[in-house]
C-alpha cells in the first residue's frame, strides 16, 4: 500500500468563503505535491458513503447535509509521512483547539464547518482516494 499519500477535501464553508486559493497555497508550501484534484458538489449518496464510519454519531446527517451544501475541492496529496504531516498542517478537528497558524485555525468556522478534511490513516487515505478518483486521474 502507498504510505506517502493522503486525501483531502476543502469543505463547502472554506470554498464559499473564498479560501480555496490560500489553502492550496499553504498545502503546496508545506511540501505536498498535488497528485489528483477536482472541484465538485457531492451527492447525498456520496457524502453518506464517505462519512459512513460516523453513521451512528448524532452529528452524521448534519455533517452529510453540510458537505452537500456547496462545491468542495477534493485532492490526493503526496509527501513523505503524508498522513501525519498533513494532520499537523490542518490542526485539530475543532478549530477552537487548532494550533496557531494551522489551516483550521486560520480558515475554519466550527467543528462541522472545519474548512478541510484529512485522512486519519494510510488505509483510509486509500479508501477515500478511491471514492473520488480513478487511477487515470492521479498523476
Ligand atoms: P473530518 O476530518 O472531515 O472527519 C469527520 C468530520 O465530522 C469532522 O471532520 C468534523 O467536521 C465532523 N465532526 C466531528 N465531530 C463532530 C461533532 N461533535 N459535531 C459535529 N461535527 C463533527
Image: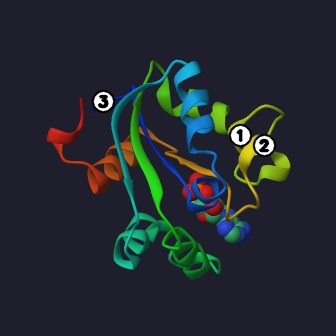
**Placement of the C terminus among the 4 image quadrants:** top left
Q: Which residue is mark 2?
A: 105
The CA span between labels 3 and 1 is 23 Å
From the top left corner, tell me how far across and down residue 111 is, in percent: 73, 61
Q: Are marks 3 and 2 in contact (CB under 8 Å)?
A: no
From the top left corner, tell me how far across and down residue 89 is, in percent: 65, 31
Q: How is the image coloured?
A: rainbow
The CA span between labels 3 and 2 is 29 Å
Label 2: how many Cα within 10 Å (few below 14, some 14–19, many 20+): many
Mark 3 / mark 2, whichever is N-terminal: 3
Nearer to us: label 3 or label 1: 1
Nearer to us: label 3 or label 2: 2
Mark 1 / mark 2, whichever is N-terminal: 1
From the top left corner, tell me how far across and down residue 70 is, in percent: 51, 68
Q: Is residue 95 left or right of residue 88?
A: right
Mark 2 lies on a secondary structure that is: helix
The CA span between labels 1 and 2 is 7 Å
Q: Are marks 1 and 2 in contact (CB under 8 Å)?
A: yes
Residue 24, quarter of the rendered image:
top right
Residue at 49% over, 45% down: 119
Q: Residue furthest front?
A: 18
Any atom of ligand 1 within 8 Å of the CB at mark 2?
A: no
- Disc marking residue 91: 1
Q: Which residue is mark 3?
A: 2
**Placement of the N terminus among the 4 image quadrants:** top left
From the top left corner, tell me how far across and down residue 135 is, in percent: 17, 41
Amino acid at each position: 500500500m502507498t504510505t506517502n499519500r493522503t486525501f483531502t477535501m476543502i469543505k463547502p464553508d472554506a470554498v464559499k468563503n473564498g479560501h480555496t486559493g490560500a489553502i492550496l497555497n499553504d498545502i503546496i508550501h508545506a511540501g505536498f505535491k498535488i497528485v489528483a484534484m477536482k472541484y465538485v458538489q457531492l451527492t447525498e449518496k456520496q457524502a453518506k458513503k464517505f462519512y459512513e464510519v460516523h453513521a451512528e454519531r448524532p452529528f452524521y446527517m448534519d455533517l452529510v447535509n453540510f458537505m452537500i451544501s456547496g462545491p468542495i475541492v477534493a485532492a490526493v496529496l503526496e509527501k513523505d509521512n503524508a498522513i501525519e504531516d498533513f494532520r499537523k498542517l490542518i490542526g485539530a478537528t475543532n478549530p477552537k483547539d487548532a494550533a496557531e497558524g494551522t489551516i483550521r485555525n486560520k480558515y475554519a468556522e466550527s467543528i462541522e464547518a472545519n474548512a478541510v478534511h484529512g485522512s486519519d490513516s494510510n488505509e483510509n487515505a486509500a479508501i477515500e482516494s478511491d471514492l473520488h478518483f480513478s487511477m487515470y486521474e492521479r498523476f
